[in-house]
Structure formats: structure tokens, C-alpha cells
Amino acid sequence: MSPNSTYPNYGVATEFLQQSDPILGKLISNIGLCQLKLSSESDLISAIAQGIISQQISTMAAATIYQRFLQLYLDYGSTEEKAQAILETPKERLREVGISRPKIRYLKDLAQKSLSDLPTLEQLKTKDDQEIIEIVTQVKGVGIWTAQMLLMFTLHRQDVLPVEDLGVRKAIKNLYDLAEMPTRLSVAELGKKWKPYRTIACWYLWKSLEQG
């Protein structure tokens, strides 16, 4: 991978997945190269804010609202400055960019904890997945799913399986021709085939939904 490449080289991961799970392997062959993008977020407050905003809305709506949110804080360089600015932003202003009232409370709590308890993104990179989940779920409104999105898209951990993700479960139902939506336990059991590249497997599952 060149230094300026948008995507890492997932060749080893996709080859492993194709060998360990022929059904997923056929999907991988149909879709082609994995294009799981590396996040450009450089601070934890922005990364977690993106996860909070993305909760329970479509990917397109989340992207639009998150960009509007970022525009409010372009002039603040450090995490501390951004956190203080979020605390000082009137709730009505955040509602204007499309953020719901509960998510405003979560963002305010994120900002407050960023000024006191939360480590930096660089510090998080040295910790294992479970430690990171325990740390970031101290923020109101940040559950395991949001923490897992942080692991997958910001910290680039390649073996994360969000068993509660509706898209993952729906894609599994379609791909494996199941009569009913798989349970969280059955998703976890199926995911054992994909270790240590469950993040990459999830990307293909999500992609399958986009392609119908």
C-alpha cells in the first residue's frame, strides 16, 4: 500500500475469508476488493460524535448531519477547545443542524468527559478492544455498538463483530438463506469462521445490502 492509498491491502484477509467460509467467499468474489475506508478523524471527540450522530438513522442522513456538526467547530484546533465549544453551543443551534434532543445530551456529556476523563485517540490505540469499549461506554448514549464502530472505522481493528447491528444480521439472513433474522448468539457463532478478520467480513455483509 502506498502512503497515500485510501484503502489498506486487505488481500490476506479476503483470501482467508474465502477459504474459511465458501458462502461468504462467493460474495467476496462478486463484490471484489474490500474498500473499507480509513477514517480521517484525528481526535476522539470527533470520532465518538460521529458514532453518536449515526445511531438509528440512515448512513446518508448521518453523514449529512455529521458534516453540518463539524462545520460548527472548524475554528477549534485542539480537543479541549472543541469540547468547550460544544458545551457552550446552545441546544437550539444543534437542533438546527439536525441533531435530536437525546443526542445533544450525549454530545454535551462527551464534551464534558473529554475535558476530564477520556484519553486521547493516540492513547486509546495502545489499548485492547475490551479496554476501549469499557472506556468509551462511560459516555452517555455510547453503547457497545457505537464503541465497536469506533474500533472498526477509526482505530482500524480488523476483528470486530457487532452482533447487534441490524444490517449485519439482515445481510446474514439474506446470504445464508435463513427463514428468520439470526439471533445475536447465532451471529457470534457464525463469526467464529471469520476470526481474525470479522471487521472485513462485516464490510462485505454491509456492501451486499447496498447491492441488493
Image (tube, rainbow, N blue to C red):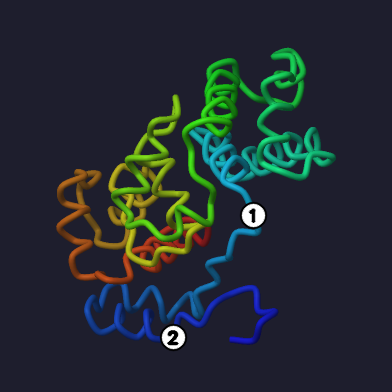
> Which residue, as the protein is rendered here, is positioned at the far front?
116
Q: Residue at x 54, y 48 (%)?
A: 120
Tell me the SS state at disc 2.
helix
**Residue assigned mark 2:** 11
Q: Position of residue 93 (x, y in %)?
A: 77, 18
**Residue assigned mark 1:** 42
Question: Image quadrant for the N terminus?
Answer: bottom right
Q: Are the residues tagged 1 and 2 within 8 Å (C-beta)?
A: no
Q: Position of residue 150 (x, y in %)?
A: 47, 50
For disc 1, the neighbor class at 10 Å (few under 14, some 14 to 19, many from 20) is few
User: Which amino acid does the dot numbered 2 rest on?
Assistant: Gly
Camera-nearest residue between 102 and 30: 102
Identify the mark nearer the N-term, 1 or 2: 2
Relative to 94, is 58 on the left or the right? left
Q: Residue at x 74, y 39 (%)?
A: 70
Camera-nearest residue between 184 and 77: 77
Classify 39 as above or below 87.
Answer: below
Camera-nearest residue between 203 and 145: 145
Q: Residue at x 70, y 79 (%)?
A: 4
Marks 1 and 2, how far apart in space? 26 Å
Classify 129 as above or below 85.
Answer: below
Relative to 138, is 96 on the left or the right? right
Q: Position of residue 55 (x, y in %)?
A: 50, 34
